[in-house]
Image (cartoon, rainbow, N blue to C red):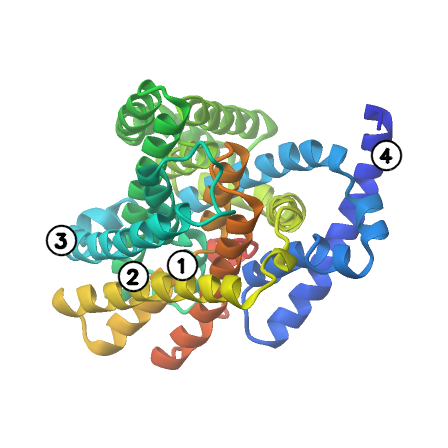
Amino acid sequence: MSSFELSVLFFLQLAFILTVCRIVGWLAKWAGQPQVVAEMIAGVVMGPSLLGWFWPDVQAWIFPADSKSLLYAVSQVGLVLYMFLVGLEFDTNLIRNRLRSAAGVSLSGILAPFALGCIVGYFLVHSDGFFTPEVVSWEAMFFVGASMAITAFPMLARIIYERGLSGTSLGTLALAAGSIDDGAAWCVLALVLASFSGNPMIAILAIGGGTLYAVGTLTIGAKLLRPLGVMAEREKGVSPVLLTITLICVMLGAWFTDRIGIYAVFGAFIMGAAMPRGRFAQEVQRQIEPLTTTFLLPLFFVYSGLNTSITLVDSVWLWGIALVVLLAACLGKGVACWAAARLSGEDNRNALAIGALMNARGLMELIILNIGLQHGIITPLLFTVMVIMAIVTTLMASPIFEWVYRQPVVTSAQPAIASVEAAG
């Protein structure tokens, strides 16, 4: 298929994707689920699991293999902009204010699922069909461990804001612990990629460079970016020139962290956290958020769905494997974080809520799985099994949270994480 034909088809794909996401989103809202769940499910619906199963010719016509690269490239722009918006809303004081409790919950939320993931990974790497032949045991163990330890930080932040818990003990603790968890998971993934490529410099660059980038951007970078906030206050808004400068900074941050092996979303998130607050943050969010969350970001879920084929899980044995993966994920993350929160002094209600929130994987899980698939570490079968786990744990988060921590939903319109509805 020529580049011209691909570009023409791309517009049809966009229309189809937006239509399906809106329909599934309406159903998810009716069922009390966040938009992230709708788009994760919509991605699977448009892939070989449903559309390709019932109407393979239609699915192959709308999403031919040649079009995946274009879909992936555009989806990465949406992913980077979304994580920038999440960083723009993230209060770095959260970690400083609750460092001790957050460290305890985060450590449990990393070590327990990582250990269980390593056990599952060791079993799977010695079974046929889950990892590529080049993968050695410890690489498989670490990859599954990192995948189990990840948290759906954007979704966690959105639920906390919508329930009016942003400044509470629960909200602060969950956000701080979630951010630490995800940072650690990316470091483990960097080690796996370094080993798999046979180049130890990948791990050194990823962990060392990522640490320097985060510290430098949040300290020196934040001071250099401060004039952007002053200009926004003086101009009473964000001009096209100011927005362009902001986007250049975001793309440079995403490029740098992608180049050193951490992945672009990390750079975008840190850059967002370093940006000035106040009018500047509100105006940038107002201008970028609608197009990002309703138009660009759903493409990533669809791209992941195109790589997910539930029909690959075609036996009782494989469904048993999927169940074991799900149980290990829930025990390692949800139960461990609940126990750690209790030991940190939280009451049982708050501890259960923290466990429910930390157990969701959402968007961040899909990112790690796509990296593993693209680098030839995991097979489509394991990708599908892990996507099932990601969807189920994300589906569980909101109902369990509502059950253990009933709180009136915030209805006032505020330019914050509540408006960033499209991912987890």
**Near-viewer residue (211 or 384):** 384
Circle on res. 100: 3
The three-letter code of the residue at mark 3 reads Arg
Q: Say if 242 sits above or below 189 in the image.
A: above
Please say if the residues under marks 1 and 4 sit with CB atoms less than 8 Å apart: no
First-in-chain label (3 vs 1): 3
Number of the front mark, 2 or 1: 2
- The number of callouts visible is 4
The three-letter code of the residue at mark 4 reads Val
Number of the front mark, 4 or 3: 4
**Near-viewer residue (130 or 274):** 130
Label 2 to label 1, Cα distance in Å?
18 Å
Label 4 to label 3, Cα distance in Å?
54 Å
Secondary structure under tag 1 reads helix
| Residue 337 shows up from this direction | yes
**Near-viewer residue (246 or 300):** 300
Please say if the residues under marks 4 and 3 sit with CB atoms less than 8 Å apart: no
- Which residue is pictured at 34% across the width and 60% down the height? 358
Q: Name the residue under label 4.
A: 8
Q: Say if 308 sits above or below 68 in the image.
A: below
Q: Say if 385 sits above or below 134 in the image.
A: below
Quadrant for residue 267, please give it.
top left
The three-letter code of the residue at mark 1 reads Leu
First-in-chain label (3 vs 2): 3
Secondary structure under tag 2 reads helix
Label 2 to label 4, Cα distance in Å?
46 Å
Q: Name the residue under label 1.
A: 156
Label 3 to label 2, Cα distance in Å?
20 Å
Taking the image as shown, residue 181 lies to the left or right of residue 391, namely left
Number of the front mark, 2 or 4: 2
